Image: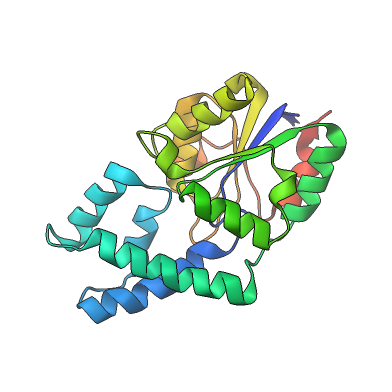
Amino acid sequence: MIKLPKLAIFDMDGLIFDTERLFMEEKGKILASYGYPARKEDYIQTIGLAGRQLRNKQTELYGPDYPADEISQKTRAALNIRMETSGPEVKPGIRTLLRWFRMQGVTCCVASSTRHEYVERYLTLAGLISCFAYLIGGEEVTRSKPEPDIFLAACARGQFSPADALVLEDSDNGIRAAYAAGIPVVCIPDLKQPDPENAEKAAVILASADQLIPLLRL
């Protein structure tokens, strides 16, 4: 059993929405147009990263001349068109879990490596914005996942102790960040299963968000 939290911290991409897959698809097209290889295993290494951590990883993968800002902007623009046209696809069990948390009086927030403006827009398009008390985007902290900053900031924003929080994540970097913050983490994998060392850091690994409900101790 897992203690019912006072604060539930949700990642967004790959956890609330099926956006990691879409972003990977759009980025693959743009990488190819620039002559860079588009490999799933490379993209997976960047999930959850932002800022300096992301730039360092991209340099490692693609070399020092990689036009990171240009490719990122083009990829985000392509993804935004898909989001505005079709709307974000909400992952299984998310709406059910959010309704259940509301009935239990649990505060919910989003802590995402994606910029705040896009987090807010995608949640609005999906009709989920009212489910969250506040949002924290990747540009609002100095260090991105796997450092704990964004999850500690989420706790501080709502004046919650990390011991009273619970993180929901899909990625290895997210698991590591929550663990470093001292916050229990539930992993709901998206593009890959967590590495064994990160799987051990998770309280539980589930196939969908609603599977968490019977595991929470009231």
Q: Quadrant of the N terminus?
A: top right
Q: Residue at x 43, y 69 (%)?
A: 77
The answer to whether residue 195 is left or right of residue 102 is: left
Pick the front one: 34 or 206: 34
Image spot of residue 72 (x, y percent): 33, 63
State whether residue 145 appears in this view. Answer: no
Residue 24's place in the image compared with 132, above or below, is below
Q: Residue at x 53, y 64 (%)?
A: 19
Image spot of residue 214 (x, y percent): 81, 41
Image spot of residue 104 (x, y percent): 85, 33
The answer to whether residue 170 is left or right of residue 7 is: left
**Residue 212: which quarter of the image?**
top right
The answer to whether residue 216 is left or right of residue 15 is: right
State whether residue 171 appears in this view. Answer: yes
- Identify the image's colour scheme: rainbow, by chain, secondary structure or one colour: rainbow
Residue 4's place in the image compared with 25, above or below, is above
Q: Quadrant of the C terminus?
A: top right
Image spot of residue 87 (x, y percent): 64, 70
